[in-house]
Image (cartoon, rainbow, N blue to C red):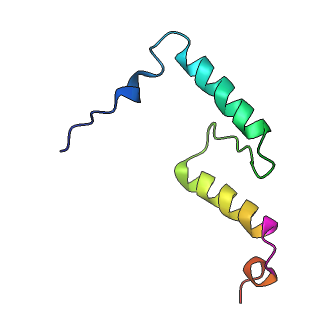
Amino acid sequence: MQQDDNQDDDMVNVPGRLTRLRTSFGKIAADDPTGVIIDTDDHTPAQLADIITAYLTEASPCPSFRTPP
């Protein structure tokens, strides 16, 4: 197994860091008209993939993408 040397793993334990990250990401999202907020709480990765796929299918400007052959 490869060792994980990522120094960002401790973001939850550094006082105030998670709050600063959420604030920063919130500002970025608010300034991005293409951004979409997805509630990830209580969803499995498979459920999130389905939510994203459904959104992209609905939002697609390409009719052939929205309607499978």
What is the x, y in percent for residue 6?
33, 33
Range covered by the magenta-colored residues: 58-62
Q: Is residue 34 left or right of residue 8?
A: right
Q: Is residue 3 left or right of residue 11?
A: left
User: Which picture quadrant has residue 59?
Assistant: bottom right
Q: Is residue 28 on the magenta stretch?
A: no
Q: Nearer the viewer, residue 27 or 4?
A: 27
Q: Is residue 54 left or right of residue 6?
A: right
Query: Would you place residue 43 above or below residue 65 in this image?
Result: above
Say which residue appears at 78% left-offset and 70% top-offset: 60
Query: Would you place residue 30 above or below residue 66 in this image?
Result: above
What is the x, y in percent for residue 67?
77, 82
Say which residue appears at 18% left-offset and 45% top-offset: 1
What is the x, y in percent for residue 13?
44, 14
Q: Nearer the viewer, residue 59 or 54?
A: 59
For the C terminus, which image quadrant?
Answer: bottom right
